[in-house]
Amino acid sequence: MTGDAHVLWMPAHRADPRPLYARWRQEARVVRLVEPARQMPFWLVSRYADVMALLRDNRLAKDGHTLSEQARSRFFRLSADALTRHMLSSDPPDHTRLRTLVSQAFTPRRVEALRSRVTAVATGLLEAALAQGRVDFIDAFAFPLPVIVIAELLGVSQEDREQFRAWTHALLVTPADGDLAPARAAGQGFLRYFTTLLEQRRAAPGEDLVSAMLAAEEQGDRLRPDELIGMLFLLLVAGHETTVNLLGSGLLALLQHPEQHERLRADRGLMDSAVEEMLRYCSPVETSTARFTVEPTEVCGQVIPAEEMVVGGLLSANHDPEVFAEPERFDVGRTPNKHVGLGFGIHYCLGAPLARLEAAVTFELLLERAPRVRLAVEPERLEWRRSAFIRGLEQLPVRFD
């Protein structure tokens, strides 16, 4: 690709990156970009078939700790090392061991058992929002719902959720001024918090997932302290970040497509397919997590040198016309819908059943209790988060008539 390696972070492309991805799918199967604040280079694969191949390509490594020190300095500048020791940054057999440890907490059956609690939390949040009349949907609902749920699963204090929000934002969103100090401070904050939490649970175990992880460690699952911290970081951040963006962007999609909003209101049986369409159309995770070449490797016809980062463009793949008929059409009844909004392969999103449940509960409640919700600002004034990894709104002002 020729041109500006920072182009994906331009305000116009943060507002709507889909035309840029469409051009890349036509012109180049893989492009080299540089994240501007960190000056972090990586290669992005844009076509659906190529993204699917990348997500199951065992020639590439997930574990960045196997890279040379020089390469690591290009890719890991912000977080404490322990925060990266989790299943999304590991390869088998470590990945298998780590995923097995927590997978039982996120089976469809276990998640379905949470429906009544998710509904109760969502109802309380919506009632408070309705009483105000006008709210920022992200702040009043989309953020607190998944954070409350995952915090309860982990057994962490609800009082800390705003701190988690600030730390997560600092780590995931590219700073406009290029100042990385807040991101480094956030990484250290998470590290201190989880170190203390583990000490507390070792001394006084509870019924939460943290205590269960510690118990599994004692039974011989060989969890190192840094792996415990890394898994807690992943579960907390991934356990709410995807859902925040799914709820905010999903509601915006409904509000901008009133005919689909009305169609869903008239036929609640479309709720599951509507959530899948939100995952495709909005793609709350814009790009996959990183893979690394361990040697010069041909990817999509391009030989990529050793110790380079490669990611899959999930949003781009989800709008590939080779796979999805009229991909820019938001269709709550779309079928088939083989999107990659939550990844694919062995690193497929572990919390997918919980994210789907939280979304279904949210939109059922909104259709029932707030059928005339509408945007409180012009769409052009909405601000999207400055990140090419996650895709979400900073705020979503809405009115309840």
Image: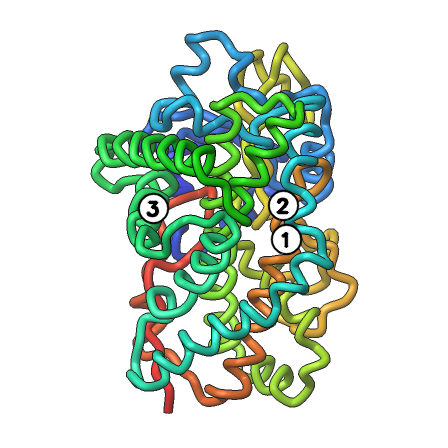
Q: Which amino acid type is marked by label 3?
A: His
Q: Which residue is identified by label 2?
A: 349
Q: Where is residue 229 in the image (x, y as percent from the top left)?
A: 46, 31
Residue at position x 49%, y 48% in the image: 154
Indicate the secondary structure of the residue bearing disc 3.
helix
Q: Position of residue 247 (x, y in %)?
A: 49, 65
First in sequence, mark 3 or 1: give its number. Answer: 3
Q: Is residue 49 placed above or below 319 in the rendered structure?
A: above
Q: Where is residue 94 in the image (x, y as percent from the top left)?
A: 66, 23
Q: How crowded is mark 3: few (under 14 residues within 10 Å), some or many (20 or more)?
A: many
Residue 181: image quadrant is top left
Q: Residue 292 carries which label?
A: none
Q: Where is residue 380 in the image (x, y as percent from the top left)?
A: 33, 68
CA gap between label 2 and label 3 equals 20 Å
* Observer-nearest of 385 and 256: 385
Q: Which residue is identified by label 3?
A: 169
Residue at position x 70%, y 42% in the image: 344
Residue 376: image quadrant is bottom left
Q: Which amino acid type is marked by label 1?
A: Ala
Residue at position x 35%, y 23% in the image: 77
Q: Can residue 30 be seen in this view?
A: yes
Q: Is residue 6 placed above or below 298 in the rendered structure?
A: below
Residue 66: image quadrant is top right
* Observer-nearest of 94 and 320: 94
Q: Residues within 10 Å of mark 1 (few under 14, many from 20)?
A: many
Indicate the secondary structure of the residue bearing disc 1.
helix
Are the two marked residues, 1 and 2, in contact with CB atoms closer than 8 angstroms?
A: yes
Q: Which residue is identified by label 1?
A: 352
Q: Which amino acid type is marked by label 2?
A: Cys
How many marks overall? 3
Residue at position x 57%, y 67% in the image: 359
Q: Is residue 17 visible?
A: no
